[in-house]
Image (tube, rainbow, N blue to C red):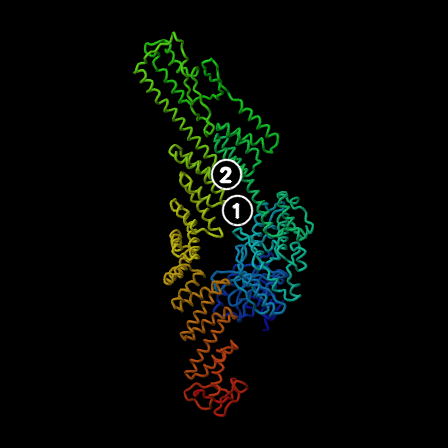
Amino acid sequence: MDGLSETSVLKDKYNVTKRIYRDDFSSIYIVQEVRSKKTYTLKEMFHNVNDSISQTVIRELTRVAEKGVKLDKNPDSPRIVDFFLYKGKSYIVLDYKDEKSIERLMLYPTLGKTLRDRYVTVRGIASGGFGTVYLVRDISLPGKYWAIKEMQNECDQEIIEKSFKIESEMLAKLDHKCIPRIIDSFGEGNRLYLVMDYIKGESLSKLIKKLPEGEYFSEEQIVDWALQICEILYYLHNRTNPIVFRDLKPDNIMINEEGHLKLIDFGIARVFQGTNTATTRYALLTEGYAPQEQFFGKAEPRSDIYALGATMIYLITKINPQKLGPDFPNPATMNPHISNRLANIVLKALEPKLTDRYETIQEMEKDLMDLQKLKETRELEVKHMAKGESYESAGEYLKASFEYMKALELNSNNEKALLGIGRTYENLGLKDKAREHYLKILKSELGSDVKEIIQRKLDALSMEEQVTFVKKTGDDDERTVPLTVVTPPKEIIDTEKTIPNLPQKIGDSEKTFSDMPQKIVDSEKTLPLIFRENQSSQDKTKKTLIASVSRPPEVSGESKKVTKIPVLFMSVIVLIMIPVIAGIFYFIDSARINRLYTTTLSSVMEKRNLSKASENMENLMQQRKNLSPEQLSLLETNWLEWGNLLMKGTRPDLKSVRKILITVKEINVSKKKDLVEAYVDLLNKHIEQKEISLKEVSEILLEVEQLDTKGFDRDLAKIHRIAGKEYGKAKNFEEAKKHLDLSLKLVPENIESLFLMASYYMEKKDYDKTIDLGKKVNNIRGYILLAEAYLAKKDLENAIKFLDKALKSSPGVEEKSKIISYYISVGQNYLVNKKFDKAIDTFTRIMDTDKKNTPANERLAEAYLGKGEEFFEKSLYSDASKYFLKVKSIITKGKIFEKAEVYLAKIEEKTITGSNTGKDYYYGGGYDGGGYDGGGGNTGGGNKDGGGVIDLGTM
């Protein structure tokens, strides 16, 4: 191809002024627009694309030009401003600023080319020493874009292709949310290609550059990113065949539009290590990020740990680690927002000696998680303290004590929380509990200042007001009993005031007893009503009444006379005393219930002894009618908190959690939604276990069904779906169906549930129901399942239809293998039924996908043989010989090969010279020299090619 001359004018719009570059694929020119006289860069492409896709290619590249898309993400990159076809060639026009515009364009030699008649290279993404990355449009999938990495091979072609195949297949098997999928790999010319997910976002290196001067990423953000990278490296390092990334750096870490981290640019460097040249050319050594052992070709998992440390120090300091190392300074001295603990983790990862670094990525991850947990714990501690102080100032001492206890659980040395708990006990009237708490503090290792405050509080609690309760004995001895005196409740004082209505005299009897009622009235003087503090009460205004009525003093014998008390008077006394005594018993019973409530609440609040707390709760629930809704709600809240706390552990005690949730379910006052949420969390914890207890999950689901689950349909559908899947694995298909039915009832259009239910019917050989459900799935797995069902029904046309759909849906390695196996089964069915044309079509599809598939290759040869035999039997020897030759072109040994040779020999042996007798004729002589190419043959009527006419009609 001569290309354009320097005087050429394209479409009456662009004058060619200079040719800059040319290769077998394209040429680059400087052009001037006729009207504006503006200078542009023009790229001319010589390739032709398949007519069936040419319009799609044209539309895509025209759209890119109309949008003025930049060549790549570089800020100075030229824009693509025009695309057109002219005299059978295609052209892309770009801005021209200076020579750098040309240099930038030449970094992307494949721009505008269509690869494999499928991938249109729309624009560049990045280019470096190891390869070039393009954004491509997938013509086979509407609206789908991929990133494609192009690597130029300058080494031994055969070795490179073999290594590339091994490496790309290995990468295609990676399945991690933070790693882009590899969906295709191939070679064209001396270039190799990997097709992968396109990640739209920005690299960490770009995010760092965007930070204003003096601003840094927060420690929380850096730790979060580092933990995500640790998770990826753990996945790579702990595979059966461990993978060392070897080029971890901010440029290769993307943050997508959703804020999720992705590790990109998986190097294929190992592919290029077949020769010394290749190793040198493609060694992955980014200075500052590669440790010293990597420079000697000894990369191992700890090399990635070093690179992670280097990445983190860059994120912390905004200084390239190449300028800081190898003796790295403490990064906390360069960034005031970073803790020494994080700095120490980074410095340990950056140790020059392998043995001084973290041994595994798990060790580094643990230190980072401990740091993250410590920060979260401190934030939570501050939150609980603030709530506790707020409750205390509002007089809600019980709630305040709970918040202080939660803060204390997070930090046992929190002095403010310790003092706050003591204060709330005092304000609740729980003097003994406060004293016990203060004594514990004195035994701890807290500072002397705190202990001095505590001692003063203990002294104050000991100074209780005392009264003397005097009991006279026969020998006039006195015994004193110390009692705490408090003001009785108003209702008891009111009861006292009704007592003066008693008769002032007892009949007309002796004056000796005439003062008795008055003494009862003046009970505060002679018969004190004493209210001993209830040690377990949650409300300091509630006291236990102890009424003490002493016997009147003995009178002397002279004055003592037996007198009959009138019946009427006694009746009045009884009538009055009944409600008084009932009130006393009521207060005693109320105090007992309150004591039990407070004990139960304390045991739940302490969150230590589940057995004891459950026993207390069981006793308390027998008195449920005597508890207020507020009391029940408080219990419910704290039980739920306990259950949620148990679920947060690394090895949660799920049986205990379930026991707690059953308790909350029995209370069932105000936390109904929270209870369902806790049940959902419990179920999720169960299904995360390595060995799922399906029985336990089913029982818990039955408990949940008794609750109002509105708003949790998707969560429960997911759990039913997983239970159904696990039951299916265990071959318990009835249980599997039950759970899948419930899942679909909750979320009717869930793709995964529909697929599993379709799989269930496939297992039961109900192919019609499989097909009915499979059509609703509408993804690659659904297509494969539909193909399997149609294949089982011997509906081969529909089987092929869905296999074709599956093949166009970018299957993974395992899916592709399954698709090919079903194609082979379809083709085998056609072979058995002697439908050789369809068999050939089917096996050809496989060979287009996997050229080295031996089983498909052999069956294709068998189909060619069968088709040749059909023609042979009809004496159509020319057509027959074509198919026998096709057999020989794809296999070189075996029975089918031998049969084809026999048939070809027969055709040659039976050749005769003659005129057209209505049979099929073949022109030419034998196979070599005067044979198929029309050379001299037998005598007889010749043709224009010089060969005789050979009659193959009689054999």
Residue farthest along the top direction in this orientation:
558
Image quadrant assignment for residue 574: top left
Give residue 650's mark. 1
Q: Position of residue 862 (x, y in %)?
A: 46, 76
Q: Quadrant of residue 302?
A: bottom right
Callout 1: 10 Å neighbours few (<14), some, many (20+)? few
Q: What amino acid type is highlighted by mark number 2?
A: Arg
Describe residue 14's horizontal placement relative to residue 745 as left or right. right
Query: In this rendering, does residue 674 appear at all?
Result: no
Residue at far bottom of view: 939
Circle 2 SS class: loop
Does 183 appear above or below 638? below
Residue 872 figure quarter = bottom left
Identify the element where label 1 is drawn: loop
Query: For this view, does 799 lie left or right of residue 95?
Result: left
The picture places residue 363, in percent across and down from the top left corner, at: 60, 50
- Which x, y percent locates residue 524? 43, 16
Q: Nearer the viewer, mark 2 or mark 1?
A: 2
Of labels 2 and 1, earlier in sequence is: 2
Q: Which of the two residues, 723 or 770, is positioned nearer the viewer here?
A: 723
Q: Which mark is residue 608?
A: 2
Assess disc 2: are there few (<14), some (14-19) or many (≥20) residues with their C-alpha within 10 Å of its C-alpha.
few
Tell me if residue 664 can be seen: yes
